[in-house]
Image (cartoon, helix red, strand yellow):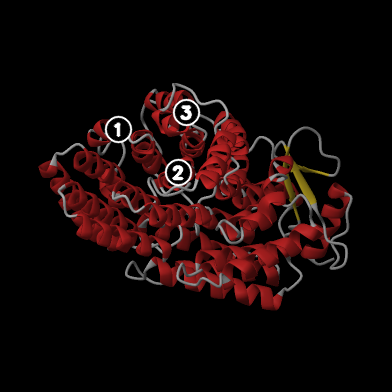
Amino acid sequence: MPRHVLVLFLMITVLGSGCERDQPAVATVTNGVAEAEPEGRSLGTVEFPTSCDAAAQEYLERGLVLLHHMTYAQAEPEFQKAAAIDPECAIAYWGMAMTYVHPLWPDVVSEEKLRAGRELLDKGTSASHASPRERGYVAALHAYYAGGPDRGERERLAGFLDGWIDVNEDHPPDPEARLFYALALLATASPADKSYANRKQAGAIAEEVLARIPQHPGAHHYIIHAYDIPALARDALEVARSYDDVAPENSHALHMTSHIFTRLGLWPESIAFNERAAEAASERTPTGEISLHRLHALDYLAYAYLQVADDEAAEEVLSRIEALEPPYQNHAAIAYSFAAVPARLALERKDWRAAATVPVRWPDGVSWDQYPHLVAIPVFARALGAAHTGDAAAAQAAIEELAALQEQAAALDMAYDWGIQVAIQKTAAQAWLAYTQGDTGRGLELMKQAAEMEASTEKNPVTPGGVLPARELYGDMLLEAGRYQEAREQYETALERSPNRFNSVAGAGIAARLGGDTEAAAAYEQKLLGIAPEPTGNPPRLAPFRG
């Protein structure tokens, strides 16, 4: 009997399900094991027959599930265990190399990992336990790793897409290959494409798999990423509300739901799921570092608390972050959270004195030189704080630092353009410095430019939104300039991109009142008090509605 037939027979015996094309083996991964009758908490269901020893199968399936959850550090050891059991298992080497590639994250594979990944794929290529489909998986990933260090991330991701197109053409019924094709489409989507062709195609593929395998983690995860934009977010709401049923103890799965809740301004749900995500995340990785998943959830949590004016809860989140001791995972999500949360607390509350002194490159132990685009966040806060408190020299110094950081960010080898994000911040800071120095016309002109630049971009998945949206800042400036109708229009446009943002709703209401539209002002007041029914600490942001 051929080896792959024997392996499939063993899988039928273990899983109680056929592996033929019309009756594929479907494994539900629970407590780290693929079981026919799952017990306890689940990580989800996958369809992943392989040519490897049956004893390795449970680890391959768990590794695959964790890949789909994007818990890469946890996935790698599972593939290593499979390779230890079956050194001729090609897909185990593919899985290890796959854990180094994070197509939607704001990082790239290091030169060391590129070398290690190529070595793993070479082992996978020469391994004897592999079907044509599995060899296709190895070849698809080779298309990412191929080439020397001069090959950029965008080119690598384009190769990744081409590789998965080939696998899908050769093995069209394979749901896992379909999902990796969807992931590649998302990784190569152009922010300038406002038809969202790649996103819609990826979402449709993931929806097809979800209809076939309702508990599939990758189908849930990639639908959320595909529709993580204002125009499409509502299409993922049902999936967001069911992802925790698939993996109720996986931190990243719990957190991912809040991408859609944030897009739709559903703050209580975002708070609930990020609290669960932070609780589910191990404080430290197996190597003793602070987990990126913990900090990532806390960042989104602080943002949501600020939108419901629960300032005390947001401050408590910052206290939880401040209490964390190094070492930290060297990851952009770690750096982003440390940079963004203190800046958010100052800027969202318009506490300009606090903004002017937000710590930069805090804390020690983070490799800040790798993240100029994230260092820019507190520098931006300082620039706005200094401009609003009349310290023109400090504001100008911060703007000059932003200019340098913009150049460094633009030079980063990443698929996402962080340079334009820093350019938006720099232009907004220049606008407010000009405005506070009495040059209203130049201030408004620059602030309009920043808002238009922002409109041409999409946010990166690492962030719940701009630390302060440029469109909202434009509304703030128009409001201060007494141009109430124009200010209201800008706030309303900002709300199309970021529904239920506290400051945009408040700004629209204030502009309506000052512009003489009392009916609209009352409607905004009711909306605002619906968003923040129980504010804490008597936040000044609510003062205009309590007069």
- The N terminus, quarter of image: bottom right
* In-image side of 80 versus 241 (left or right): left
Please identify the quarter of the rendering in which residue 357 is found. top left
Which residue lies under the disc numbered 1? 363
Type of amino acid at the residue the image marks with label 2: Arg
Which residue lies under the disc numbered 2? 513
List x then y, in percent, for residue 60.
Answer: 67, 51
- SS at circle 1: loop
- SS at circle 2: helix
For label 1, count other residues whose C-alpha is less than 10 Å away and answer few (under 14), some (14-19) or many (20+): some
- Regarding residue 412, the answer to whether it shows in the image is no
Which residue lies under the disc numbered 3? 546
Nearer to us of marks 1 and 3 is: 3
Type of amino acid at the residue the image marks with label 1: Pro
- The C terminus, quarter of image: top left
| 367, above or below 421, in the image | above
Q: Residue at x 77, y 32 (%)?
A: 40
Q: CA distance from mark 2 to mark 1?
A: 43 Å
Q: CA distance from mark 3 to mark 2?
A: 13 Å
Q: Are marks 2 and 1 in contact (CB under 8 Å)?
A: no
| 72, above or below 198, in the image | above
